[in-house]
Amino acid sequence: MEIQGPFTIAINDNSETGLRELHLGFKPGFQQAELTDRISTVKEHLATLNKDIAAETDPNNQQGMITIAQITQELLPHLESNEIPLEETIVIEIGPSQSSPFDDLLRGATLK
C-alpha cells in the first residue's frame, strides 16, 4: 500500500515508557505551502483516505487508516488557524508495545 498525503508516519516502541507511539510529521512541501494550499491538501487527503477506507478489504489496514483519518480530522481546525508548528513531529501514544493495525498498514508502505 502506498501512503500518500501531507504527512510522514512512523511507529516507535518507546523503551523508556513501554508505550507504542505514532510519530506524525509534515512533509517539506506541505510545510512550505501557503496556508490555503495546506488546508486544501489536507481536505483532499481526507476525502481520498475515506474512499480508500471504504475500498479496503483488510480489517487491520482499514483500522489503521480510520485512525489516521480521525487524527487528521482533529488536526484540521488547528491547521486552519495556523496553530501547529509544521517543523515539529506530533507524537501520539497509542498504547502498550504490541502488534497494532499500524504494523500491517505501514509494513511495506512507501511514502509518495
Image: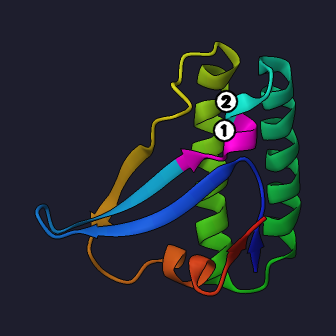
Assign a secondary structure to mark 1: helix
Q: Which residue is mark 1?
A: 73
Quarter of image, res 29 = top right
Point out residue 39 in the picture as x, y percentages from the top left corner: 79, 27
Q: How is the image coloured?
A: rainbow
Q: CA distance from mark 1 to mark 2?
A: 5 Å
Point out residue 81 in the picture as x, y percentages from the top left corner: 64, 12
Labels 1 and 2 touching (C-beta < 8 A): yes
Q: How many marks?
A: 2
Q: Give the residue displayed 61% in from the left and 47% down from the top.
A: 70
Assign a secondary structure to mark 2: helix
Q: Give the residue displayed 65% in from the left and 60% down from the top.
A: 66
Point out residue 82 in the picture as x, y percentages from the top left corner: 63, 16
Relative to residue 99, is residue 72 drawn left or right? Answer: right
Kindly identify the amino acid type of the residue bearing the numbered disc 2.
Leu
**Front residue (pair 34, 70):** 34
Q: Give the residue displayed 78% in from the left and 64% down from the top.
A: 112
- Numbered range of the magenta stretch: 25-30
- Looking at the rendered image, the quarter that the N terminus falls into is bottom right
